[in-house]
Image (tube, helix red, strand yellow):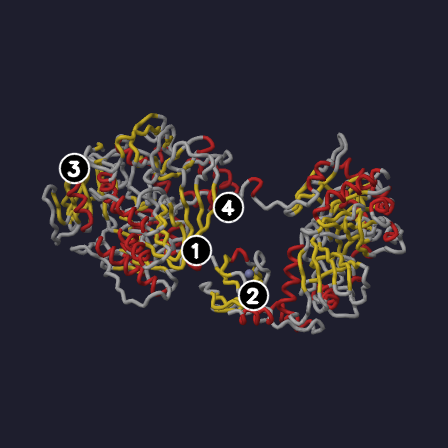
Amino acid sequence: MKTRRLDNYGKINRDKILSFRWDKKNYKGFEGDTLASALLANNIGIVGRSFKYHRPRGIFSSGVEESGALVTIGSKDRRDPNVRATTQELYNGLEASGQNAFPNVNFDLAGINNYLGRFFAAGFYYKTFMGIPPFEWGRGTAIWMFFEKFIRKAAGMGSASELPDPDSYEHAHDFCDLIVVGSGPAGVAAAIEAAEKKLDVILVEQDSLVGGDQLAENNFDNSQIKNQLENLGIKIMTRTTAFGLYDNCVVGLLERVTDHISAPNVNIPRQRFWTIRAKHIIVGAGAIERHIAFNNNDIPGVMTVNASKHYLNRYGVLTGKRIAIATNNDSVYETAQQLSEAGANVTVLDSRTNFEIETNKCFEIRKGYVPYNINGSKKIHSLDVSKSENMNKSETINCDQVLLSGGWSPAVHLLSHRGVRPKWDYSNACFLPSDSKENITMVGSSRGLWNKNDCIASGIAGTTDALNRLGISKTNYFFPKPGGWKNPIQPLYEVKYKKSRSKSFVDYQHDVTTDDVRLAHREGFISVEHLKRYTTLGMANDQGKMGNIIGLSLMAELLKKEIPEVGTTVFRPPYTSVSIGALSGRNVGKHFRPLRVTPMHQWNIDNGAKMIEVGLYQRPWYYPKENETLSDSYIREASTVRKTVGICDITSLGKIAIQGPDSTEFLNRIYSNGFSKLQVGKARYGIMLRDDGIVMDDGTSWRLAENEYFMTTSTGEAAKVMSWLEELLQTRWTDLNVNVTSVSEQWAGVSVAGPKSREVLNNCVDDSLVITNNNLPFMGVTSTFLKGNIPCRIARISFSGELAFEVYVKSDFANTMMDLLWENAKKYDGCLYGLEALGALRVEKGHVTAAELDGRVTIDDAGLSKMASTKKSYIGSAMRKRGVLKNNDREILVGFFPTNLKETFNAGTIVCEKNNIKGQGIGRITSVTYSPELGHWIGLGFVKGGLDKWKDTNLVGADPVRNKQMNLKVVSPHMIDPKGERMYA
Amino acid sequence: MIRINCPYCGERDHSEFSYGGDATINYPSLDASEKEWTEAIFFRKNIKGFQFETWHHSNGCRMWLVVERSTVTHEIKSVKPCHPNLQKVVENNK
Ligand SMILES: [Zn+2]
């Protein structure tokens, strides 16, 4: 193929020369070029190698349907594979390379696959490597897994960068009355009509310029249209693809903000992911020209007819000198005329015999002729043609380019996203969109209109339809009838020539041939969806935009059915690919999830805390001194709490204010234990069950006044409990006068625990009398003041089993409280302790947390039967002993000691009987810690039948994940101070 | 994307809401039998078409809503507060 840039053609800016690199060599293009047009202008015909056979591939199209010119753009951390050269705008310094070839696309060693073609037919890999049944070799899957990486490499697409993406992406949102997809004649007419009727309109165009297919017209000037649209206040979004339609007229857009700029401003995102909420959607997405299947129809130099028109009129590139055009419809003749006027020698082969067409007679028309074979390998030498009714009468035409037009497929993809199946139209040989019940209207050639005036009329009709559906007008309208050519199209999908063993391609990128479709049929894959998966037809980057209909027609022929009976595959979003970066937007790195910190977060860090993530919260994990490790540190912290005093940030607990005259009744219904007699000034530990009788959460509720409670929940369940309480009050118990308010962020909480905790607090409160054992007994609550007139709430609650207090102040006072407590704790050789020590202390005491209350555990399983009131009914009471929940071999909470006290074990260990180590065993270990008090490792967990059954039995802890096993014994979960004497001190 | 017209906040994306469940269940009294509770909790119709369901405007006004939604098309016919008193307030403000 010999191409050249013509002086008097194209809308490129010849004053602005751009340098770019292709496969490590320097070339030049102009502003306004795409990479494809610049490559063509530089006479580069081979731009890639095909997926399986590594055949040389050229540029097939000028748009998003491209399935040949998929290239890699950029390098290192900005390496972007599988980019369509046809839609990539050229910029200065652009670096691009061919894919799927070694050492390069011109000389590819794997091209040998082309000669081994019969081994690489559809399903070859699956049959050879995956299909080996286990009973033959016993290792079919293993063989596949071994070979997979080599096969994937050989059959690879371009490879993505494995480095972190240096670019930023953004999520954006907008609203409008009407969104119009596509800025061709139909879309523009619709947008203008709507804006004149005062609708708020967004017009989306995937190209860099508005105009649609008019950009392929000679002398088309789009600036006038642009001005008109802008003057009407229409928001024009170019370089933006509507990739998907969703419920309620929501449209997903991908805006390519800087992909066309050589050195983008680092403060601007590379791409924006838009969510548009519209009231009506008009789709004028155009139509896509199909190719024709025949032998060697993939040789570089093959292109759609319309693409060559684009290259000529938009980019000033004449794509061939001696051009053969093969067609079955009228759409090619304008292009043929323009190509010949531009200096090419053109021959049109039209499969139809009876038709009339007006031309300038500068080119030859051969009626009733079809192409059946291209001669050449890296470029076209000649085309074998014959009479369509008599394949024996053949001749050869010398040419350097073959342009194909097998008809046009309206882009019904977006409507298909909404589950609307297109219907086959025999007279136009294409699928046409069906009507949608949703507010979506198809206009222009995407509803099968082939001429411009019809497209414009349909745009105006589309907007009238929108206005009617939105209740703004009640105007009659009609859409022009599909079609618009003078002579009818004659279906032509494949030209068969039986003598040859060459390949005839349906899907260029995935190397799906007509023989593959026939093979699939022979092997029984006759459903369209099976055909697609078995041959991978339509599964490449272009998603079958060009080849699907050809595959469908072949299957119809084999099944002796009509195309609509065979069906069509459903198109799903995205229309064209969306980068992962755009999907994640700014939710990357530290912004991947929201971060929650307590008001004393900085205080904790300043005082040496190492932090850990618990859900979204950052919590102090441990406070190492000098060179202490995690375990040195938490063991010291836990022993200090037991010996003197420790301070721990517990702000992450959920906190809910419960207020109103029916608060007591409310709590009495949601907690399994009684709350009706809780006095003002007292707190109670409570358990909430779900409707189905399983434990949901535990926590405490403090009665601050007659009608006011302060509830705490576990950190992880805080949001769930809040929603649950709201649900009960708003949906089930609407007669209760109770108000619930989340106050988790309003209060900062700290636990002061250990035998010296009261002494420390004495120094911190205004009036130490309020916290004496008499005035503040175990589970007592008081509202008082810390020194400095800081209002606070103190409750004598213990999670560690020691004498302990929970102190809450308003969040603004958190740091002051910490300073005050810490200053005084130091006087008693106290410590700050983190989550690890907190865990050790509670495991020693046998207190359950989320590790135990995992949504499968009943109150009885958790050893908390005493917490289940028998005097009242409550949520879950009717269900907590249903069916299997009352079996007596359920797993019950116990403690575990290693038999040899020097041994350790891990959470997740499976507990088994000695001579029966298999399956799920008889129990599991959920939490473990080193117990400073006992001097060895201990665990909490569950075992079938509980302590009573296994008290003196030697059991085995199996830890297959860590390849460990140890002997265990079951003990009471209350491993220290079982009577709780310390708490009451 | 489903868009739900919250009577208090206006039309919002479904991502602001959390799905509850069947809004037509009459939960039995707390002292009702295990059988009655089993029916209420576990037995659900699998409706094709419009159904009443609860949604919680969890990232908004925190109101629990009854939404009449088609399980086939996601079309929403009506949205109102679950709590009868809030329903009245909404009616009075129309
Ligand atoms: Zn709301």
Residue at the farthest top position: A25
Q: CA distance from mark 3 to mark 1?
A: 46 Å
Tell me: A402 left or right of A209. Answer: left
Q: Are marks 2 and 1 on the same chain?
A: no
Disc 1 marks a residue whose amino acid type is Arg
Say whether disc 3 or disc 4 marks the residue closer to the N-terminus. Answer: 4
Which is more foreground, mark 2 or mark 4? Answer: 2
Residue at the farthest left position: A361
Q: Chain of mark 1?
A: A
Is residue A626 in view?
A: yes
Which residue is label 1 attached to? A277
Which is more foreground, mark 3 or mark 4? Answer: 3
Disc 2 marks a residue whose amino acid type is Leu
Which residue is label 2 attached to? B65
| Mark 2 C-beta closer than 8 Å to ligand 1 | yes
Q: Residues within 10 Å of mark 4 (few under 14, many from 20)?
A: few
Provide the secondary structure element on which disc 3 rests.
loop
Q: Are marks 3 and 2 on the same chain?
A: no
Asked where in the image residue A603 lies, by quadrant, the reply is: top right
Say whether disc 3 or disc 1 marks the residue closer to the N-terminus. Answer: 1
Which residue is label 3 attached to? A342
Percent of width and height locating residue A360: 10, 44
